[in-house]
Amino acid sequence: MNSNQGSPIVLVVFGVVAVLVFVIAILANKQQESRREALRLYAQQMGFQFVEGEIPVGGNNLLDLFSTPNLQGVEFVQFFDLFQRGSSRKIHPMMLGQDKAGTNWYLMDYQYTTSNGKSTTTHHFSVVLGHLALAFPAMTLSPEGLGTALGKLVGMNELQVESEEFNRRYYIQTSDQKLSLDLLHPLAIQVLLAQPILNWEFRGPYIMLHLDSRATVEQFDAMRTYIDQFVVQIPNYYRQDYGPHGMQ
């Protein structure tokens, strides 16, 4: 008797839940489409190519996937650990182009998956990469936190700069302390302190910023601007020694 009376209620509950799931899925899809269109318009305004299809990451060179042969440095996946993690690595979508200063830009959504044997997790990122005619040391500026504190406990080397505020904000690792100090001079540090705290990575000819989430158009544009603001502060002597004519 009680079972018969309860069954309609259970069905109603399941029906309501199913409708809610369906509505949420529709709204999420519309939000995704709206964001994709905003990114497409941004690429158009910047004069960048918009690559909408999924780009698998794992080959030696991505250049063949694009119809912009004058862009150099698409092999960035070989330079950064982010593009070596997990499995099912892919970029989707990507905006790429060159600005008036000659910097090649790659703005993208990137994801990979990890598994613990019981469940699979997909990790999402938004990445902005600038490819310049300069050579950088392998350097990371990581926001200070639990991970960096543990690193210090196990003896990971950390570069210190003259600004105590900057040292409290960022954990600096580098392959070349002298070159990093040349880049992180007082004016450059002031520029970085005026910006939000972000994950910075320098490798070879690249500077990379990334968020552990899906960026809005405004966030993509802001990260590109932050890199530009830093690049302007690179000293002339560094450009002469590690630019096109000084690279060894």
Image (spheres, helix red, strand yellow):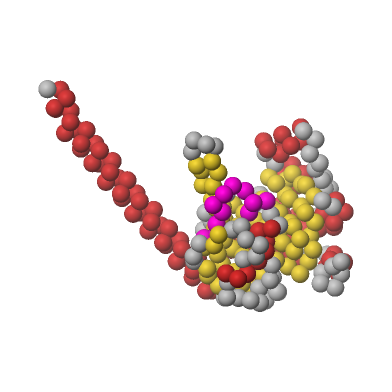
Please check the rendered image and state whether residue 88 is part of the magenta-colored stretch, yes or no: yes
- Range covered by the magenta-colored residues: 81-92
- Look at the image and tell me in which quarter the C terminus lies: bottom right
In the picture as drawn, the residue positioned furthest to the top comes out as: 1
Q: Is residue 49 left or right of residue 203?
A: left
Q: Please give the name of the residue rendered at 74% of the width and 56% of the height, measured from the top-left corner.
A: 202
Residue 213 shows in the view = no
Q: What is the x, y in percent for residue 244?
A: 81, 72
Q: Is residue 241 left or right of residue 101?
A: right
Q: How many marks?
A: 0
The answer to which quarter of the image holds residue 8 is: top left
Q: Please give the name of the residue rendered at 79% of the width and 60% of the height, measured from the top-left corner.
A: 136
Q: Nearer the viewer, residue 222 or 17?
A: 17
- Look at the image and tell me in which quarter the N terminus lies: top left
Q: Nearer the viewer, residue 142 or 52?
A: 52
Please check the rendered image and state whether residue 228 is part of the magenta-colored stretch, yes or no: no
The answer to which quarter of the image holds residue 195 is: bottom right
Q: Nearer the viewer, residue 81 or 22?
A: 81
Residue 168 shows in the view = yes
Q: Please give the name of the residue rendered at 59% of the width and 47% of the height, measured from the top-left corner.
A: 86
Q: What is the x, y in percent for residue 88?
A: 54, 52
Q: Please give the name of the residue rendered at 15% of the width and 22% of the height, measured from the top-left corner.
A: 2
Q: Is residue 85 left or right of residue 36?
A: right
Q: Relative to 102, does residue 225 appear above or below in the rendering?
A: above
Q: What is the x, y in percent for residue 163?
A: 80, 47
